[in-house]
Image (cartoon, rainbow, N blue to C red):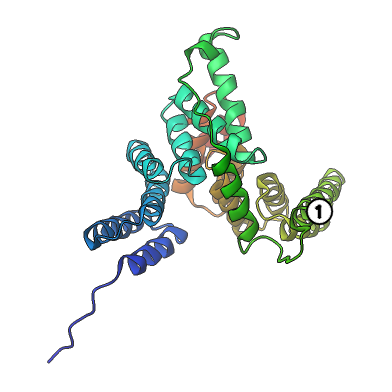
Amino acid sequence: MPQKRRSQSWAELKQAGNDCFKTGQYGDAISLYSQAIELLKKSGQKNQEDLGILYSNRAASYLKDGNCSECIKDCTVSLELVPFGIKSLLRRAAAYEAMERYRQAYVDYKTALQIDCNLPAAHDGTNRMTKALTEMDGPDGWREKLPPIPTVPMSVKENFLRTTKSTPTAQPNNNLNGNKQMSGDVRKAKLLKEEGNAFVKKGQHKKAVDKYTQSLSQDPTEVTTYTNRALCYLSLQMYTEAVKDCDEALHLDPLNIKALYRRAQAHKELKNKRTCVEDLNSVLKIEPYNAAAQKLLEEVLKMK
């Protein structure tokens, strides 16, 4: 008699969803997160944080799958469950931006910056939205048309700092100088990145890759280091590695133009026509008059 299969818990479904997301199976991830959400709701456990994470994860999958309206819905639910969740704010901002709802995107990017003022994705997003809104409403009038920007409570900022310090990506440090140690790592990462940039200017791309790799070991959250190393990989004809670095950059900043364009360049060389066209269309959705992307798209469309 066949053994009855044990039903999966919501946590196991969540992990399976995470695994699918990492391998680019976004439709499967959405299905698994949906099952986990329903199971957690039925369990009667009033764990708003876990439920908020599931909605935020499903939102990320929707965003990757190009379903921005569902992403916005899930982020909104997640933010109702866990107010000022930084990932949900950034994902909703990216979805708003993709749908050209620039005022709402600006508000979410600015809210995220109140929580973490050093967040590259939020800084870049705010700058893009400022430019878009200035062009749309004029240099003087665009701020007047913004929805109200919520004030983030100090308790949320303090909790974010505590959580950041305790994450595994931070350097282990049990003394009272933890913040100094982390800021020291960031400073070291910046210096190594600048050394890499100097090698790029000299055309020494292998040496630049080494410096960027060392920099990322100190600060794995710096988007431009990934895109810079991707540029080097393109020059060294290491196209698969370039794609991986652009993937990492886009995980941190989903609408990063350089990462999208360089990934498209790599996909072109790898003969991945469909994914190359998708990335270039994403670039042109954000910057409709990007001449380099337009030219590359024309070349790729002629490929057989």
Q: Position of residue 65 (x, y in %)?
A: 38, 46
In-image side of 10 versus 161 (left or right): left
Q: Position of residue 238 (x, y in %)?
A: 66, 58
Q: Quadrant of residue 241?
A: bottom right
Q: Is residue 277 visible?
A: no
Residue, x 37% and y 41% (percent of image)? 80
Residue, x 64% and y 40% (percent of image)? 120
Q: Position of residue 119 (x, y in %)?
A: 63, 41
Depth check: give the residue in front, 51 or 4. Answer: 51
Depth check: give the residue in front, 6 or 25. Answer: 6
Q: Position of residue 88 (x, y in %)?
A: 45, 43
Residue designated by label 1:
184
In-image side of 169 versus 185 (left or right): left
Q: Is residue 82 visible?
A: yes
Three-letter code for the amino acid on which mark 1 is drawn: Gly
In-image side of 181 versus 110 (left or right): right
Depth check: give the residue in front, 302 or 132. Answer: 132
In-image side of 261 versus 302 (left or right): right
Element marked by disc 1: helix
Picture quarter with the N terminus: bottom left
**Count of numbered marks:** 1
Q: Residue furthest bottom?
A: 1
Q: Crowding near pointer 1: few (<14 within 10 Å), some, many (20+)?
A: few
